[in-house]
Image: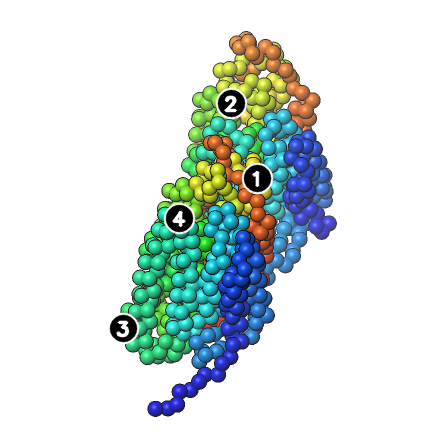
Amino acid sequence: MRGLLSAVTFLPAAGALALLFVPRRRAGALRAGALAVALATLALSLPLFFGFDGEAADYQFEELRRWMPTLGIAYHVGIDGISLLLVLLTTFLAPLVLVSAWRAIEDRVKEFVLTMLILETGMVGVFVSLDLFLFYVFWEAMLIPMYFVIGVWGGANRIYAAVKFVLYTMAGSVLMLVAILALYVQHGAATGAYTFDLPVLARWVIDPGLGQNLMFLAFALAFAIKVPLFPFHTWLPDAHVEAPTAGSVVLAAVLLKMGTYGFLRFCLPLFPDASLLFGPTVSVLAVIGVVYGAWVSTVQVDLKKLVAYSSVSHLGFVMLGIFTLNQQGLVGGLIQMINHGLSTGALFLMVGMIYERRHTRLIEEFGGLWKTVPAFSALFLVVSLSSLGLPGLNGFVGEFLILVGAFQTSPWLAAVATTGVIFAAVYMLWMYQRVIFGEVTREENRRLPDLTPREWAVLVPVVVFIVWIGVYPVAFTGKTEATIEALITQVQSKASVR
Amino acid sequence: MPPLAVPPVALGPLLPTLVVLAAAGLVLIFDLLPPRESKAHLAAVALAGVVGALLAAVWRWGRPGRAFHDMVVLDDFALYVHVVVCYAAALVLLLSTDYLRRAGGESGEYYALVLFATAGMMMLASAGDLIVVFLGLELMSLSLYVLAGLFKRELASGEASMKYFLLGAFASSFMLYGIALVYGATGATNLDRIAAASAGRAHDPLFMLGLGLLLVGFGFKISAVPFHMWVPDVYQGAPTSIAALIATGSKAAAFAALIRVLVVAMRGVQPDWTVLFWALAAVTMTVGNVVAIAQSNVKRMLAYSSVAHAGYMLVGLVAGGAPGTGAVLFYLLAYTFTTAGAFGVLTLCRRAGEEAVEVGDYAGLGARHPALAAALALFLLSLIGIPPLAGFAGKFYLFGAAVRTGYVGLAVIGVLNSAVAAYYYLRVVVYMYMREPEGAGAVWAPSFAGGLALAIALVGVVLLGVIPAPFADLAQAAVAPLLR
């Protein structure tokens, strides 16, 4: 179906444009309108999944339109097994996030829903772009709505967090712009065809050496900051903690994936030699992130900060999987990206729910919640267990595959990374125990209301997928394996051409 | 003694400039007619003149012409700059009427002087001779010196005018001295003849000294570091509408003349000035951006930002060739819409009857005037270089040209500077959307003409950002004949 991908990408922005004309005092209509747009986008994106041929490694639903032919820039979009699931994760979470913010955002509702919808267009755009210029446009443009979400609707220290987020991310991505230009120029000089088209550039075998290494590093820096790979993670706790719940969910579930996606989509196929050269270093940094993130999570007193640091740990697993460069590791890394989006997204949602009730996120303020809010506690248990990788839930599938992949390439690193799984159990279960079990220590906690129907509506879809991926991952990995296989072949054949 | 040859008078190549000058004359005459309270009719005449010149420039496109013994060259390059200058002047005129009335500075000569300055800028762009470069420069500068001091009763305005005049006079004399030395070395003031005469004498000290002094003069007008000292004080003290004109039109015209002098007259010594401009670009970008961080006055901040943007454009000059020089031309267009828009929002914001110039005045603007704040935010994002806005497209072409010609180091300095710049531009956004005002914040001073100017600038910023290629291709086609 031609045009479907563009429709999915731009429907949220078009919806935002339409909602611009709704007067700001009609907050209810604005919320409902935004939700309708997000749901329509989700509905439009479903045919992408069902129409996607998992046997084929090629880009599907491709669209190629002239944009700036003199420069070799085209509007080229398409999805393969790597981006399919990420696009769906984005369209799936967008309505949930809007519903979760139904009561939490009372101030400047109009600006909020417009920003969220524009953000959705930016995120989907990043995942579907097959032209480096187009990709960069979405990549940079998407920073601004996120900046507003953190800076306008965030917590006490929101301005610091928002500015830090933007400056950190920009510092990385401007160098990527130079690398994109350098790649364009080198490809043009070598082949005579000046183009920003990713499939064309990816077919070209670039000379190994300093040039390729520098370009890889420029791309990698931009992505490593976004992931965030240790030691580029210091923006993340600030941004996650200060952002409103909706912002934290989007940040954790989708924005961080842009970093790992960037490694898969650009670094590996474009710079295979450099990827092999720097792969071990990246893997070591990833494992440091796994262990460090887990340790730091353990000692957090703030629930949101704990979840934020756990992201550093989980994304370390993803990076480890990607740079194993084998089938299990890459498929595991990809599925772990989705898992992290679901379970960490759900964790942020639930922390947000409890914050709305108590206006605190300190672990010591809670205790014995099972007695007062049993439904919340039960769902929180499922989500926590998913996050720590309990077999039968989604987190296990990803981590297991990553570790299987890593043991083949570097057993010692895999062994160290495995301790991350153990520490994950430590910090998640210890936190769960202190918050949910035991006696009710605070009087305020006795009167807490349990989940409202709106909150059920937000959480149940996520939990369904947490279980579904855990029990029957093939429904999702089946769509990606052909692409991953082609990617590995491509990297190995290009790197060995020398 | 041979009889004095009277050159054939061909006014065609001067047409756009003449339209502006005619309008200036009309403004002066109408101002003498029975005086009226409002000067809006003068603004209308001035605007008509500028729009007429714009149309004339578009009409002349693709039909190059020369006049007065090649002293005036109206090629596509000149026409492109004419369009930029006319847009700048038109936006400034639209922004001026209500702004001046509120500030109590409305007068007939304001509009005439804006037109004279515009005519000077257009002469600069089409100058084929160093003498005409100097004439255009002086016509433009003298008008702007007066305009900078328009608010006679304000000390800052007087200081701005005085400083601008004194330093400008120095720069002019440097330039004149440079012209004299170049004439001494080559026996010509015509750009083509200088090129022919200087071929093969790259290391003639007289010529090189002349070139250096010329560049000092140009460095002053384009506000390159270390010739930028006047910029913050003049932008801060001058009427905001005039600061906009200095930042956009005068910079575009000076860049146009600089490009023509460099790539036509000085093509024989290109390696020498390329090295010089490499350093100049790096220093200008970095100093402009770093110092801008420390500013709390928005006009001063925009002043240093305009220094930084001059540095970005110098990157294009260093890259050279049709891609680099064309990128400078395109950047001038993109930058004009963006900067005129940003200054435009400033002219429309007042706090307690005064101009709102401190960044704190803008606290909470996003809640009070969502449309105005959104406009300023878009202009600032374009100045940062966030896609898909004009500023990004401009930087993309500039740095793309630099990478293409092997100046990757300069491109890296440039993009890192853009990241630094994000900090101070975003600070205004932080105030508008994320901070509550202390006391009464700035409010929108309604103005239909001002709103129209902002709308035009916004359309320009978005259009040039989303489909830059046609305009950038035109720019490259326009510079190509110069490079032959």
Q: Are marks 3 and 2 on the same chain?
A: no
x then y, percent, for residue B68? 45, 79
For disc 2, the marked residue is A303
- How far is disc 3 from disc 4 in space, using C-alphas? 46 Å
Pointer 4 chain: B
Q: Nearer the viewer, mark 4 or mark 1?
A: 4
Of A214 and B265, the residue lying toward us: B265
For disc 3, the marked residue is B206
Mark 3 or mark 4: which comes first in sequence?
4
Amino acid type, mark 3: Leu
For disc 1, the marked residue is B369
Q: In this view, does A460 lie above or below B83?
A: above
Q: Are marks 3 and 1 on the same chain?
A: yes
Q: Nearer the viewer, mark 3 or mark 2?
A: 3
Amino acid type, mark 2: Leu
- How far is disc 3 from disc 2 in space, using C-alphas? 73 Å
Pointer 2 chain: A
x then y, percent, for residue A158? 49, 31
How many labels, in total? 4
x then y, percent, for residue A56? 66, 48
Q: Residue furthest front?
A: B34
Label 2: few (<14), some (14–19) or many (≥20) C-alpha neighbours in 10 Å: many
Q: Which of marks 2 and 4 is in front?
A: 4
Q: Which disc number belongs to residue A71?
A: none
Mark 3 or mark 1: which comes first in sequence?
3
Q: Is residue B338 visible?
A: no
Label 1: few (<14), some (14–19) or many (≥20) C-alpha neighbours in 10 Å: some
User: Is mark 1 in CB contact (under 8 Å) with mark 2?
Assistant: no
Q: What element carries label 4?
A: loop
For disc 4, the marked residue is B153
Q: Residue at x 52, y 46 (%)?
A: B348
